[in-house]
Amino acid sequence: MIEQLISAAREGVEERRGQISQADLESHLSARGEDRPFREALVRPGLSLIAEFKRRSPSAGDISASSAIVDQVGAYERGGAAALSVLTDERHFGGSLEDLRAARAACGLPILRKDFIVDPYQLYEAAVNGADAVLLIVRALGDEELGALYAEARRLDLDCLVEVHDGEELERALALDVEVIGINNRNLDEGTVDVGTTYELMPDVPAGKTVVAESGISERAELEELERVGVDAVLIGTALMSAPDPEARTRELTGADEGTREHHLP
């Protein structure tokens, strides 16, 4: 499955590059808005929630095809989310760079561009269209590609969520001394999800790294247990996108109404 997604991502880059050159994108970098540090939002006291906007996915199909991104991200912000994740892959997730721009204009949270990043061109797209961070999937990249994309992203002042799924991928990420590690509980080859993946890999993550647990998380009790073992943040999409009241669901997950998290207090 992941090979198809990577291939589609490369095709999409070439199509867009034919419409807007990388040089054109670079010329707009100076117009970027306020700095919203992504990593800083994840390391405040308490477990941080990265709330995701996605209309559909290859595994779940249509989730909320008609959702308005402005309304959804507003609900996430009011509900106590620390950051946003916005899918920009159109073919498989129903997203777009326009969604990224809309989310940026609609709220004050730092934003992760979530996509299959395979080319430096996408980093410039992310920076110009309002992202504060990008997702780099170790499984999708060779060591040289991963290192080059990571270095270029940091040069553009983009934080990186470097995603791993097993011990070998974690070693590759740590070889780059990355700051933010995403542990994806989903096997991207098979599509299966096992939250135990996070618990299995956590002991091998050195102190000082920021850890984000991804996929298969939907209940407050799960967040509390992940926080107990040292996870700094969770990324949740489907459980929020499918909720009848996304603000209430976000509050339930973050504990925003309990007043126990310093970064959610007025």
Image (cartoon, grey):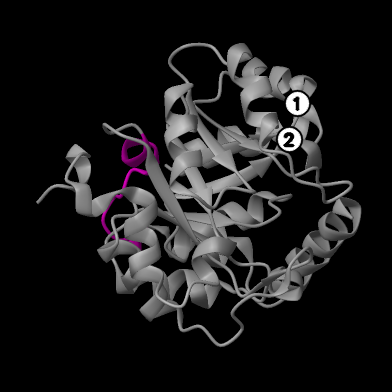
For this rendering, which residue is in front, 199 or 263? 199
For disc 1, the marked residue is: 169
Amino acid at the residue labelled 2: Val
Which quadrant holds the N terminus? bottom right
Q: Are marks 2 and 1 in contact (CB under 8 Å)?
A: yes
Is 39 above or below relative to 1?
above
Count residues near mark 2 (Cα–Cα under 10 Å), then give few for <14, some for 14-19, many for 20+: some
Residue range of the region highlighted in magenta in the rendering: 30-42
Q: Residue drawn at (50%, 50%), measured in percent from left and top? A: 219
For this rendering, which residue is in front, 109 or 217? 217
Image location of residue 159, percent across then percent down: 46, 40
Is 157 above or below relative to 231?
below
Q: Residue drawn at (64%, 75%), measured in percent from left and top? A: 63
For disc 2, the marked residue is: 138
Quadrant hosting residue 7: bottom right
Image location of residue 137, percent across then percent down: 70, 41
Q: Is residue 147 visible?
A: no
**Outermost residue, left direction?**
266
For this rendering, which residue is in front, 158 or 135? 135
Report if residue 39 lies within the magenta region: yes
